[in-house]
Amino acid sequence: MEDHNLSSVPLLSSSNNSSDDDESHFILTIPDENPPPQSSSHQHHQIQISNGHHLISCNGTERNFDGVNPFSFLGANGFEMPEPGTIDPFRNNTPKIEGLYEWLKIAVCLPVALLRLVLFGLCLMVGYVATLCALHGWKDKDNPMPRWRCRLMWVTRLCARWILFAFGYQWIKRKGRPAPREIAPIVVCNHVSYIDPIFFFYELFPTIVASESHDSMPFVGTIIRAMQVIYVNRFSQSSRKNAVNEIKRKASSDQFPRVLLFPEGTTTNGRVIISFQLGAFIPGYPIQPVIVRYPHVHFDQSWGNISLAMLMFRMFTQFHNFMEVEYLPVVSPLENMKENAVQLARRTGHVIATALNVVQTLHSYGDMLLCSKASEFKQEKPSLYMVEMAWVQSHFHLSTFEAVDLLHVFLLMNPDSSGRVEIDDFLKVLGLKLCSITVKIFEFIDVKKTGKITFKQFLLGSAHILKQPLFLHACELAFAECDVNGKNYISEQELQDSVAPAMPNLSAEEVHRLFALFDTDSDGKISKEDFFSCLRRNPLLLAIFSPQISRRNLLKPSHRTPEENV
């Protein structure tokens, strides 16, 4: 497994650690928060951010100002910031047709590709009709499929083998053998291409675990229903729990086929494996790991950042596509050590990674969703927005949906080609003005003190605040301080008065922009639901209410759970 050298990064770096010559810094000019009443001139503070220290100039007099943690009232210190990874587990090495050899090969193979396409369509239709016949009149689908129906499904299985032939897999190299079903009722495999399940459908005819969305796919949905598929919505806890129960039930009975899972939850490029979901390991049954490889020189067959249509076209126009399948020794739970699902998954992952001679990273399906979101925003390098979600989830208990929402906010900040955001765009999207407290918020995230932040810094900083034990209690107190008349909503004027200690002298436009951010339902007032919803999506905004909370010493340790504080 990839080694992360995690160390707690101090919120403010010491100036002793670097010389004046190599300090990175930039200068911000902001309006004076408290101009002297006797002075009619327009005055400014000049803030120079340099390695965590501010140099503030006021009336021509400079004074040093050590940055203060704007979230200290929550008990939140700095957060762990692992070194950025350089591995992209989803990148296809040949997304485009390049080189004279490839173009010539495609030209030569085009007539063959047409014949392969006809063979593919014919086999798909024959297999579909055979599956309809096998399923016709079968209503008791909670029990094993009757034998005569299984025999009829052999027609579809043979069609699957011819489909593989049409895609250029005239022969497939195998090593090892499937363990008997009674010894290893669960099979797990790394996932590289849509070819994987087609092969296992032909080879093993297993019960598979698949996303609910696959049921609506033309032809394919019908065929996988004949495999007595276990559907799961990966974002629903109840669905995942039900899927685990079904895996247990079907794995425990020899009347059902073996259960096949791709624990990575998505396809990778095969040059690494990513973190495993635990569904295959929670039942605690012996597991047979299987690995698939797609050796290649000119055409990478992995289903990564390449469209399905292009991938199929490239497969049709190859002389031959190579595939290797290796059945590994069975991995059994260590009963004397009372091995849990996490440990069994880790041990199985190590076996697969060793056999493939690759590393297992802490990426997950969530990273693929982040890449897809970045692609929607036309980012040059979507892989810059991967954060190794398995690590994030284990350390901050942040859901994939929350991470995608935070990425949406970050992408609105107009990141540059290197995926970094400057303070002006950061403040604009969050509806904040440039002042002392907002500079401190930015510096809290800018742990590297470069004057720019990455999405990973923004995500981890936001998650660190969002998951503080006192976060919800602080939101409750902040709303109560704003709702001075106890109306259960906040007006625009009340919001301005509440944030004035942190951000004085806001213009009417600045107040309205901040108010619109909190007024999530756009009804002209901020309800408690609006207030909490905004702070959950933008937890860093809680700092602008900190002066009142800290000054009145309202935020005291609570013996209640965060849920009870709401």
Image (spheres, rainbow, N blue to C red):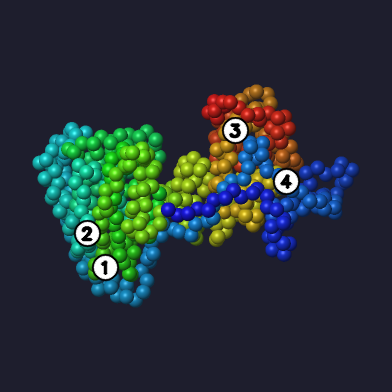
First-in-chain label (1 vs 4):
1
* Marker disc for residue 71: none
Q: Which residue is mark 1?
A: 318
Q: At 26% from the left edge and 65% from the top edge, which residue is drawn? A: 321
* Marker disc for residue 470: 3
Q: Position of residue 51 (x, y in %)?
A: 69, 55
**Crowding at mark 4 (Cα within 10 Å: few <14, some 14-19, many 20+):** many
* Tag nearer the camera, 4 or 3: 3
Q: Which amino acid does the dot numbered 1 rest on?
A: Gln
Q: Which amino acid does the dot numbered 4 rest on?
A: Ser
Q: Which amino acid does the dot numbered 2 rest on?
A: Arg
**Crowding at mark 3 (Cα within 10 Å: few <14, some 14-19, many 20+):** many
Is the residue 244 above or below the residue 128 in the image? above
Q: At 41% from the left edge and 60% from the top edge, which residue is drawn? A: 91
Q: At 22% from the left edge and 43% from the top edge, which residue is drawn? A: 183
First-in-chain label (2 vs 3):
2
- Label 1 and label 2: CA atoms lie apart by 21 Å
* Tag nearer the camera, 2 or 3: 2
In the displayed structure image, the side of residue 507 where residue 182 appears, left or right: left
